[in-house]
Amino acid sequence: MALYRYRKQSLCLDSALECAQGSPAAFAEVLRTRLADDAVTGVALARPLLIGQMRHVLGQPAARLAFLLPKQGLQMPALMALLEWLARVAGERGALRVVAEVDERSAAFEGLRRTGFVVYAWQRVWSFSPSGERPEASNLWRPMRSVDEGAVRSLCQLLLPPLALAAETFLLRPGQGLVHCRGDELLAYVSVLSGAQGVYLIPIIHPDVENVEELLRDLLWGQSRGRNRPIYLTMRSYQAWLEPVLAGFQGGVAPRQALMVKHLARLQRAEVTASQAVLEHAWTRNLEARSSTKNGTIG
């Protein structure tokens, strides 16, 4: 099958992946090559064939749906079977939940809902071009350091609603995020994903910041200096108060997306005996050994 024909027919379910790395059609090509360790691909035997991919790093609590293709062939029975299979494999790999980002007008939205995914937030992705003159940035942001991790987690717990906290996974890595402080108080954090096709930003900003317009402008200009890639800034529904500020900048905005999650396990406190601990350790080793058999076909 010539997968390149589906380049414009694939439906990306991970905005960060698409904005930073490019078209998800590039990831469909892995069906003809050796898959990465964190990629799981399934095929539903329908007409046309329905292909879906999930990404999960062993040891991480969340898996992410990467893409479906072709987006015009999302017949409900096949789509639901494929999504259920991917979720089952995610659970077998140790994931506690699967997350996806989807346009609310897509047929995939209803398929996700029917297979147990629920909406925990909404988002719009804004895009900005690095072309044109811009004044010098005022350095309101600095790279996140290891000493900032506690303050960033506290900021997330303060500003994210409970549903989002239960679904979101911010991997806090020093040097890969930005923070804004007023004195000793950390008031804003930005998750930064930089790729060959663009820079993807997710800001979490406290309403108590001063001159938020200058703060956002400095963020965008700081990311565009010395680069010729578009800048993508994601506004979640719990940060919607920032969108009127972005509307004043010269940028574009994509249609609204639903952030959806399917929880695979419920955390419970339980007493664990020594024999249970040995069995669980053995199960983990067996799971890692079986990771090479992670791809499948759904009849």
Image: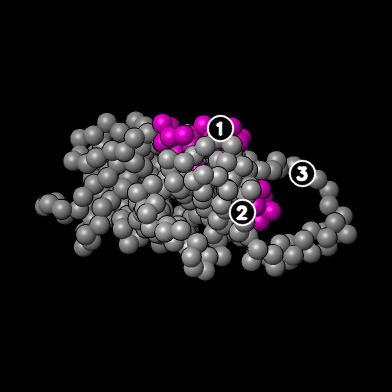
Residue 234 visible, this angle:
yes
- Identify the residue position indicated by label 2 in the image: 297
Residue 234 horizontal side relative to residue 118, left or right: left
Nearest to the eye among marks 1 and 3: give it: 1
In space, the residues marked 2 and 3 are separated at their CA atoms by 36 Å
* Residue closest to the far left: 133
| Amino acid type at mark 3 | Arg
Q: Does the magenta stretch include residue 101?
A: yes
Q: Where is residue 194 in the image (x, y as percent from the top left)?
A: 35, 59
Q: Position of residue 138 (x, y in %)?
A: 21, 52
User: On the image, which quarter does residue 257 sit in?
Assistant: top left
| Amino acid type at mark 2 | Thr
Q: Is residue 57 magenta?
A: no
Residue 265 horizontal side relative to residue 213, left or right: right
Decide which of 155, 181 is in the foreground and name it.
Answer: 155
Nearest to the eye among marks 2 and 1: give it: 2
Please give the name of the residue rendered at 56% of the width and 65% of the height, measured from the top-left corner: 37
Q: Earlier in the sequence, mark 2 or mark 3?
A: 3
Asked if the residue under mark 3 is in contact with the one under mark 1, i.e. CB atoms within 8 Å, the reply is no
- Identify the residue position indicated by label 1 in the image: 113
| Numbered label attached to residue 200 | none
Please give the name of the residue rendered at 28% of the width and 38% of the height, measured from the top-left corner: 253
| Amino acid type at mark 1 | Arg
In this picture, which residue range is highlighted in magenta? 87-116
Please give the name of the residue rendered at 43% of the width and 42% of the height, measured from the top-left corner: 71
Q: Where is residue 168 in the image (x, y as percent from the top left)?
A: 52, 44
